[in-house]
Image (cartoon, coloured by chain):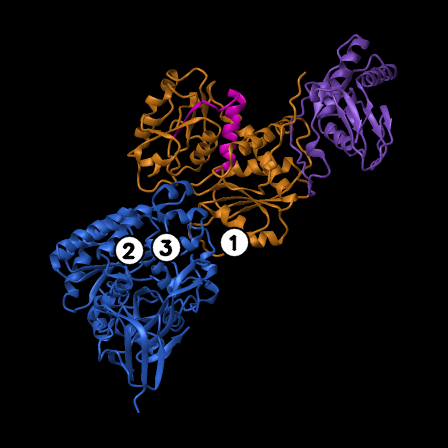
Chain colours: A purple, B orange, C blue
Amino acid sequence: MKVILDSEQIEQILNDLAGRIISESPRELDIAVIGIRSRGEVLAQRLSGRLSQQFGKNVPYGTLDITLYRDDLNSPQGTVQPQVRTTEISFDIDDKIIILVDDVLYTGRSARAAMDALIDLGRPRAIKLAVLVDRVGREFPIQADYAGYKSDAAPGQLVQVFLSESDGKEEVVLE
Amino acid sequence: MAIKRKSKQLKWRRKHLLGLRELNAEEITYILDTAKGFELISTRSVKKAPPLRGKVVVNLFFEDSTRTRNSFALAANRLSADVIEFTKKTSAVSKGETLLDTARNLEAMGIDIIVIRHSAGGAPKLLSRNINACVINAGDGFCEHPTQGLLDVYTIRKIKGTLDGLKIAIVGDIAHSRVARSDMWAMTKLGAEVIFVGPPTLMPTQVRRLPVSVSYSLDEVIEKVDVINMLRIQFERLGGNPFPSVREYSHYFGLTVERMKRAKPDILVMHPGPINRGLEMESEVADGRNSVILEQVTNGLAVRMAVLFLVNQAAAQGD
Amino acid sequence: MNSELLIKNGRVIDPANGVDTECDVLIIDDKIADVGKIEKPAQKVIDATGKLVTPGLIDIHVHFREPGDEEEETIASGSSAAVAAGFTSVVCMPNTKPPIENETDVEYIHRKARQARKTHVYTMGAITKKREGVELAEMGFMAEAGAVGFTDDGRGVQDQSVMLRALKYADMFDVIVAQHCQDNGFAGNGVMNAGYYSTILGLPGIDPLAEEAMLWRDIQLVKKTNVRYHALHISTSGSVELIRAAKKDSLPITCEVTPHHLLLTDECCAEYDTNYKVNPPLRSAKDIEALKEAVAEGLIDALVTDHAPHLQSEKELEFLAAPFGIASLECVLSLYVKALIEPGILAWPALIRLMAEKPAKIIGVDKGTLGVGKQADVTIIDPKAEYEIDVNKFRSKSKNCPYHGWKVTGMVEKTIVGGEIRYEA
């Protein structure tokens, strides 16, 4: 097991992502951050805080549960069974630029499911994907607009993100 | 913002929902938690999600029921399933095609989930033993009506936060009520105290052996309870005449404005519907501020979506 | 040349003649020629060492479904099953389609039995026409044709005035009147015992009162008429109390019990398995206790089967809709061993009494004994043989039996009817 990102590096990446989002987003347009459960929501909260500060106006954040949109629901799982949780988005997503946030972008299936879920909730002006870790191994033609750390971990390896709000520690490890 | 750690999760293995008696508190809570995740679908503009896309759900109803049937049909549609309606009126003695033959024929056409309502207790169980599709009990005789029990406790939990320690009265024809039985199992397992209220002629013979208390007086009970569930007097089911007149029944067991004055101010008034206005309760009570009858209907959709989702999951994961 | 059959060294149990000893039985042609230590050789010898040699068992309550439901059972298949179970005589119930209600119907049964050549088959006749409980059936003609009892079994005679009239009329013929005690007002449309289980399973219940109310009523009528009366398949502790009081008053009342009412409770219905749906229904543990005490006390006069065959397709319905009935003819001896011998409630001689001697007296036939000169109906039993009940091996056409897979003791080795070995294990 190897630690590939420590808490300082994570902090740095988030600041960097926030900076890039700000520089590319027109000030006059509404922007919101939505995190994919469950670590995506932590990152979304943190990002929205940084964006709100920089923009000087409130950039809201919400949480998206993608269980109902997964493409593996009707096939035998392994030991993990997806539990349906709640989607909590208290604002209207119509006409907003939505920054979709997840901890790891890997096959691209979660992002695909998230986009389908989002579109059933309304019609955003644009969706941009922001991830903490971008690893190789896409199975779908999906790319991150704002990628943090680029990992070339092999298919059998696991990239695991730990965040203090959800896991009590702050690091990204490669197993 | 504190995020709850993912505790060791229940793995839902049941591909049938036949009754609440055989579920434990953990399983019931799991269904309620899952239902929470489905609430949003009914309120947003696109009222559909894809988990049951390509699946076929059959509403196999041998008893009249527009409301439960529509609720299940809508729930299945919201999950992108295809729904077949199959209503058949039979008397208790099967005439013509047997229940199993009907089910097997449907199965041969390729269906995934059967939602069955039947006048014979145990009919869903008979199906579950003999066919491969998932079976959901929408009411069997006077045995159970599990989704009604679930939506009832869901409604209570949503408003009161928990059922633990609550006193709940269920009033009416308990002897012939599957809703009373399902409610009893769900509520007691979640920690509530249940009181059956009604005339002695409408109590089941061995009611003292059930995990409930019994009262023949609504007046005595009304001040003490946090929730009151008024059951429908089903004239079509009553054999003989267990009470002399409708007038006398509503005098003793009707939920009147007068009785509500003596109830706790935050009491929840529930009813599985359809209401016989003026019989089980006065109109003002049905429409009053303590009534959660319409919420029950809304919650019923979320609960049924959750149940359809879960049994389908269990089936997909194989035996 | 006379045919000889010598059964040697068995434990001969003949309660009617007070015999329970190791000795031999000699059969010549179709009669019992001698019982005792027999040294002279014979044509055919059966070594019955370690086995019981008893009068042929008699089941006075079976349903062979002929005429009308021959796909469920016929007299041929039913009596094949019976003879393999150690019975040399059976009594059919008249609730066939059409019911047995005149002399031609009775003769039909007898003829079919003769053709089958397995056991002796007797029949009861209906008390009322079509078993409707309104008009009396032709008891006289049926009695003359050889009917051994009258009953509307499957139903009880609801109208008390009709039952009184039936008892009075039956007084002319020395034929017993038997009742399936079920007051429909109390039974309603019940399908199992009214109790905790019927409540949580959501099924309508048959209150014990349904049986006890009619039994009580009939006992009053017997007090008035003093006609011989037999209570079929009693199932409740309340019925036991009524019988106890009636016998204390020396009323001419007998009664019988089935193995399922000694072995199974209503809890068995919890999975809605219709193999446990029977009428009278399976009752509570308390009722089983009372019935077992009644057997020990000598209150019960006959152990029967109430063999009620049904096809799988008929039983494969919702519990509410499935027909009542358990078909247990072929394993019944081992069931009574389990219910009564193993727990020490009865010893073998007492059991044989209730399965041969007393049933014969109830139906008024000269059987159930191994007396010299009597018809050679003999059953040879291995009391220690253990086996597992397998419904697929049953000779009966129907397999609706809840005892499949039970490990039991007590097997029939040979059944001899009228001097002929009609069954060998």
Within 10 Å of disc 2 (Cα), the crowding (few <14, some 14-19, many 20+) is some
Q: Quadrant of residue A95?
A: top right
Please state if C336 lies on the left or on the right of C225 as rendered.
right
Q: Where is residue C255 drawn, in percent x and y?
A: 23, 58
Residue drawn 34% across the image and 52% down it: C281
Disc number placed over residue B18 in the picture, else none:
none
Disc number placed over residue C278 in the picture, else none:
3
Q: Amino acid at mark 1?
A: Leu
Q: How many numbered marks appear? A: 3
Q: Could you tell me how far apart the alpha carbons at marks 1 and 2 are, in whole angstroms?
A: 43 Å
Q: Which residues make up the magenta segment? A: B145-171
Q: Where is residue A7 drawn, in percent x and y?
A: 79, 18
* Mark sitting earlier along the chain (3/2): 3
Q: Amino acid at mark 2?
A: Ile
Mark 1 vs mark 3: in front:
3
The residue sitting at the bottom extreme is C1
Is A57 situated above or below A13? above
Which type of secondary structure does the marked residue at label 2 adopt?
loop
Residue drawn 28% across the image and 78% down it: C25
Mark 1 vs mark 2: in front:
2
Q: Quadrant of residue A157?
A: top right
Q: Where is residue A1 drawn, in percent x and y?
A: 79, 29
Residue drawn 19% across the image and 58% down it: C162
Query: Is there any visible trace of residue C55 in the rendered image?
Result: no
Q: Which residue is mark 2?
A: C345
Mark 3 vs mark 2: in front:
2
Q: Amino acid at mark 3?
A: Val
Q: Is residue C209 magenta?
A: no
Same chain, labels 1 and 2 = no
Is C54 situated above or below C311? below
Within 10 Å of disc 3 (Cα), the crowding (few <14, some 14-19, many 20+) is many
Q: Which residue is mark 1?
A: B100
